[in-house]
Image (cartoon, grey):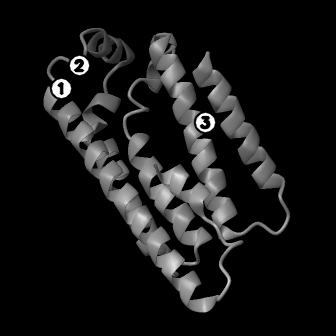
Amino acid sequence: MFYLFGAQLALFLSLILLSKKGKTSSDSILTVWLVSIGLYLVLCYFRITNLDFNYPFLLGVIFPFPLIQGPLLFLYISALTNQLARNKVLNFLHFLPALFSVLLFLPFYTLSSSDKILLFKNSGKGNETVMRINVFLILISGVIYIVWSLILLKRHKKNILNQFSNTDKINLKWLQYLIY
C-alpha cells in the first residue's frame, strides 16, 4: 500500500511541476525523475502483489529502473547548480547502463507470456548470470552517482564561497540529504 501512496505522491508532484510557468531545466529533470519514481513504485507494487502475472508484458520492465535513478539525481543536481553539460548527447550518455540492462534482458522480453510467468515463478532459474550482472550494474551505478553528485555539490559550494562574502542564506544542505 505504501508503494501506491508513494507513486501517487510522485506523480502528483510531477503534475504540479508540469503546470509550473517558467520551468527551468532542473524542473524538467525533476519532473522526469518523479515520473520515473512513480512508475517504479507502481511496478514494485505489481511485483510484490503478483499483479504483474495478470499483465505479463510488465514482467521484467522493472529491471532497468534503478539504473535511471542515479543519472537523474546527477543531472538534477547538475542543472540546479548550473553545472549541466551543454551538450545534450553527453547528458544522455548517463543512461547507457540502463540501455545496456534493457539489451541484457532482451531475450527475456521476447519470451511468450507463459514463459515469462514460468521463469518468474521459478525465481529466474537459468538466468542467474544476467541477474547478477544487472545487480552489479545497479550497485556500481549507485555508488558512482552518489559520489559524483557529492563532488558536484562540493564544487558548487566552493564556487559560492569564492563569489559571495555572505553565504549564510545560501544553504544546499537539503540537497546533500537528498543524495544520502
Q: Position of residue 41 (x, y in %)?
A: 55, 29
Q: Amino acid at mark 2?
A: Gly
- Would residue 85 be visible to someone looking at this image? no
Q: Nearer the observer, disc 1 or disc 3?
A: 3
Among the 4 quarters of the image, the one containing residue 175: bottom right
Residue at the image point whose x is 16% and y is 26% from the top: 128
Q: Position of residue 10 (x, y in %)?
A: 67, 38
Q: Earlier in the sequence, mark 3 or mark 2?
A: 3
Q: Amino acid at mark 3?
A: Gly
Q: Amino acid at mark 1?
A: Asn
Residue at the image point whose x is 67% and y is 72% from the top: 170
Say which mark, if any, is on residue 127. Answer: 1
Mark 2 secondary-structure assignment: loop
Say which mark, if any, is on residue 38. Answer: 3
Circles 2, 1 touching at the beta carbon (< 8 Å): yes
Q: Position of residue 39 (x, y in %)?
A: 57, 35
Label 1 Cα neighbours within 10 Å, binned few <14 / some 14-19 / many ≥20: few
Q: Position of residue 98 (x, y in %)?
A: 36, 49
Q: Quadrant of the N terminus?
A: top right
Q: Earlier in the sequence, mark 1 or mark 3?
A: 3
Q: CA distance from mark 3 to mark 2?
A: 25 Å
Label 2 Cα neighbours within 10 Å, binned few <14 / some 14-19 / many ≥20: some
Q: Which residue is mark 2?
A: 124
Mark 3 secondary-structure assignment: helix
Q: CA distance from mark 1 to mark 3?
A: 27 Å
